[in-house]
Amino acid sequence: MKKFIVGFWLIALPLLALSQPTAKPVSPAAYWQQQVNYSIDVTLDDKQHVLTGREELVYTNNSPSALPFIWFHLWPNAYRDDNTAFARQQLRNQSRKFHFSTAQQRGFIDQLEFKVDGQPAKLEYDPESPDMAKLVLPQRLAAGASVTITTPFRVKIPDSFSRFGHVDQSYQITQWYPKPAVYDRKGWHPIPYLDQGEFYSEFGSFDVRITLPTNYTVGATGVLQNPEEQARLDQLAAATALKKTATDFGDDLNFPPSTTETKTLRYVQDRVHDFAWFADKRFNVLKSGVTLPSGRQVATWVLFTNKEAAKWQRGLQDVDSAIVYYSRWVGEYPYSAATAVDGALSAGSGMEYPMVTVTQPAAIVHEVGHNWFYGILASNERDFGWMDEGVNSYVENRVAELHGESGGILAGLPTKGTGARLLSIDGLPNAALSQIPYQTVASRGLDQPVSNITSADYGKLNYAIIMYGKTASLLKYLAAYLGQEKFDAAMHAYYEQWQFRHPYPKDMQAVFEQTTGQKLTWFFGPMLNSTYRYNAVIAKSKEEKGQRKVLIRNDSPTPFPFPVATLDAQGKVLETQWTKPFTNTDEDDSAVLRFKEEGVAAIVADPEYLTPQLNRRDDRLRTTGLLRALEPVKLRPVISPERWDWATINWLPVIGANTSDKFMLGAAFYNSPLNIKKFSYLAMPMYSFNRKELNGIGVLNLNILPVQFTRRAVLGVVVQRFERYRKVEPSLTLQLPHTAFDKPQHTVKLANTAIYTQDDRVTASIQSLEYGVGISNAIRRWNGHIEFNYFTPDLSEDNRRTVAALVRAEVKHTRYYSPKKTFSVRLFGAASCKRRMILLLPWG
């Protein structure tokens, strides 16, 4: 599933990371997986929005163990009430829609009556998640044996809160039938339905019969078995193909009445692990097809309403492109058709199922690509979402770049023209743009690992920024290091060995190491499993025997390979070389590169922005001149990414006013807030037209992250001058804990403030200690703040000084009692004490 989300908003264990062993392949004899073959009959009642069905499945136990029970997913129950994992996650992720919905808008599954080989069987529901239940078998299912399980079921289809639901009579029927959980070499995997966090299912075959009114058009998993319906779809496709512009489609989105007659559509497919279908009476249909290198034909379809019809016409080409390029770069598409459907999806911009996806036009390539990563390579998405979303995003970005477009979360940003120049992204490669969201969160200590974390544990922004964006960037980096040809060979080998199976990260690593002949623990271990800050710099450069000898220093806590290039006087890359994965303690020649000397004017670290660095200001070194390390400085408005070829100062116009200075006009100059640097600054001069003098604010911060007990520490000083007074305030601010999402957030600030008059006389000194805490979800927010201030005013004429202490405390609670209305309660208290002192001062 693709989510278009853009947001602005450790101490590591390097020895442990370095000790991770090289991945071992799973031997064919040791590997096994369960088989589930389904036969389902279901009828849609589009007046009550109810499915009534019957399911028969044959479960084959290929494991070495006898099974006393089988875990089942009953995922429609996720929409039953507020006591589900889905409901709780909605609140955590700041969504109130489900919480304030009515019982009629929600959904469930009931009328279950399980039998195992004709014998009644008991369901034991999980007490925390009513969408999971353990089916207790009448007898243990022996290793190698099969059992037939049957049950009727009824499903109340919810409104569109997530992937399963309806909007009026437009239906997205997904995660809708009783489904066994995966039992694999790591045990059982019963997982509740979540909006953020996807699925893990057993392979098998499906024979599904869907009964509904005759004027519905359906897109589904599998091969349609009804010749008359196949002819109807071809006729609809031919009629739609005659429409050339959006005007030809019109803007009518009304639902026609349902016919009283019904039809039963049958779909059959093997080697898939899920079945989804989408039905709407308003669908336009377009059909195309591609021929694979083997000569096999794949039919491609798009089903869409009149909304965004022009985009969907182009979308048919995107389906074709995805089938062609994923087949070329990963492995040949094994099914006979691929369909993209326009739907009222509430979870992100699209969701994938075998052979069919519901999506927005902009996400078609990504969602169709999930047929490979999720569909054919069926990894555990809940625990290792990057193996699906991240790897798929990498291939999707390659397709976009092939068509001259930018990929990733910031897809669509201009890289040429006035807008690109103002944002300082002119000439930047896609790799640089793709890393901006990651750099934004990582420079604030808000990032999370790619792997070694479940999908549900990500912050909402990081779910897209890290799992999708950073993973795709890291794979592009790995491909550049290995060489694209070797990387593609490894990906093909991975696909061939693990198609229609359940690979884990170690399995992917083992295939890549076997295929490339290189140990890749540095990548599949620390780089994916940690939040290390990576940085390497050009330490030395000198001419030696007609060559340019370059020494690279790795300032990271773990090894990684690094690219370096030589440039000519015009900035053109002459030669690029890579180090091996190394640390500064390595005794071999890993960190030394030798280039041709002719024409070299500068040396650049990582000229293509491939490595996951936060700091690029030390990436360029000129080989001649006195100021070898200084680069041009450019003034740019608002924000700009960091680049190696020039430094940027950002600016904004500023206006202000107060009772003494009156109207003031000025500008703020600062380093970009996109990627917070170790040293950050703000200079904001403001001219007072009343006093005809210069005022303003200056800020200098030292940002330290991560540290042992805090997420971020900021040591700073603020200097400001207004109304003929000057304030100087050094401070230390601590933000904690490391996690920044569904736990209380704490801030501690210690400051010393001195107020000066025009003649530099101290009028007051204030020492303050502040503590703040906050926690919130979609319906309630708690904030607390306590502050202690100690005041020392200036001496009076008789050497008397009044000192004062002030304690202030505040607690505020805000709660939503409807989707858009809140009430708040605020408790505030303060206490102070004063003491007059006589000081005996030595006067000269």
Image (cartoon, rainbow, N blue to C red):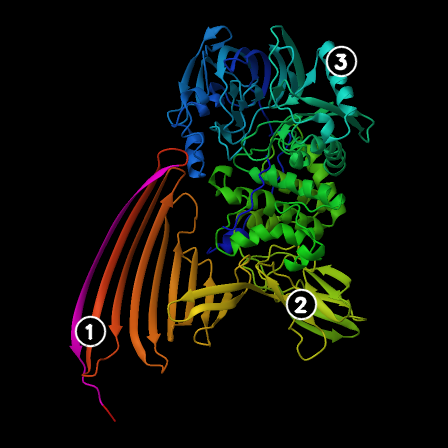
In the rendered image, residue 239, in percent from the top left (x then y), is placed at 77, 20
Q: Residue at x 37, y 80 (%)?
A: 758
- Residue at the bottom extreme, as displayed: 844
Disc 1 target residue: 802
Q: Which residues are magenta?
A: 821-842
Image quadrant assignment for residue 695: bottom left
Which disc is residue 231 wearing? 3
Q: Is residue 518 visible?
A: no
Which mark lies nearer to you, 1 or 2?
A: 1
* Mark 3 or mark 1: whose residue is earlier in sequence: 3
Amino acid under disc 2: Arg
- Residue at the front extreme, as displayed: 690
* Disc 3 crowd, CA 10 A, few/some/many (<14, 14-19, 20+): few
Disc 2 target residue: 620
* Mark 1 or mark 2: whose residue is earlier in sequence: 2
- Nearer the observer, 839 or 297: 839
Q: Secondary structure at mark 3?
A: helix
Which mark lies nearer to you, 3 or 2?
A: 3
Give me the C-alpha separation between circle 1 and circle 2. 57 Å
Residue 691 as seen in the image, left or right of residue 562: left
Give me the C-alpha separation between circle 3 and circle 2. 64 Å
